[in-house]
Image (cartoon, rainbow, N blue to C red):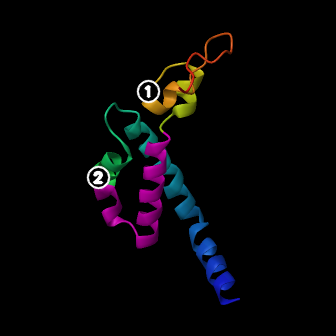
Amino acid sequence: MEAIGGLLTGFGIILTLDNLFVCFLGSMIGTLVGVLPGVGPLAALALLLPITFTMTPVGGMVMLASIFYGAMYRGDRLLRRRHTRRDRDDVLCADDRDGRHSFRAA
């Protein structure tokens, strides 16, 4: 029972409006930085780490986590919709215009 109480307390802290706004802002910034060629999630974290120095500890951790996930999934849906390839992993997801798979796993 004590673990469930701690879990509910954590969700209560994370799901405040301030932290949700920081999460949204961090994911947008992470996506924008992650779209740059050659910039991965760790490089995005290293570039944007100074932003979190003036925040509260919880807000800083939420911002770093959202920057990481925003940079990791950097517009993959848009790239797949436009049928362009970005990484080796995206090659397997590219489709032709008529819906057939243009690349198959070997």
Farthest residue to the front: give it. Answer: 106
Numbered label attached to residue 1: none
* Position of 2 relative to 36 (above/below): below
Mark 1–mark 2 CB contact (< 8 Å): no
On screen, residue 4 versus residue 42, left or right, reads right
Instruction: Report if residue 71 lies within the magenta region.
Output: yes
Residue 36 in the image, given as x and y percentages of width and height: 35, 32
* Position of 49 relative to 2 (above/below): above
Q: Quadrant of the N terminus?
A: bottom right
> Number of numbered discs present?
2
In front: 91, or 75? Answer: 91
Q: Quadrant of residue 81?
A: top right
* Type of amino acid under label 1: Arg
Farthest residue to the bottom: give it. Answer: 2
On screen, residue 21 versus residue 56, left or right, reads right
Of the two numbered discs 1 and 2 in the rendering, the one whose residue sits closer to the viewer: 1
On screen, residue 65 versus residue 81, left or right, reads left
Spatial CA span between label 1 and label 2:
22 Å
Badge 2 is on which residue? 46
Question: Which tag, 1 or 2, sits closer to the chain's start?
Answer: 2
Q: Find the magenta span and give its range.
A: 49-73
Numbered label attached to residue 86: 1
Picture residue at 43% right of the left edge, 45% below the top: 30
Farthest residue to the top: give it. Answer: 98
* Position of 100 relative to 14 (above/below): above
Q: SS class of the residue under badge 1?
A: loop
**Predominant SS along the magenta part:** helix
* Type of amino acid under label 2: Ala
Q: SS class of the residue under badge 2?
A: helix
Could you classify mark 2 by the number of other residues whose Cα lies within 10 Å: few (under 14), some (14-19), or many (20 or more)? few
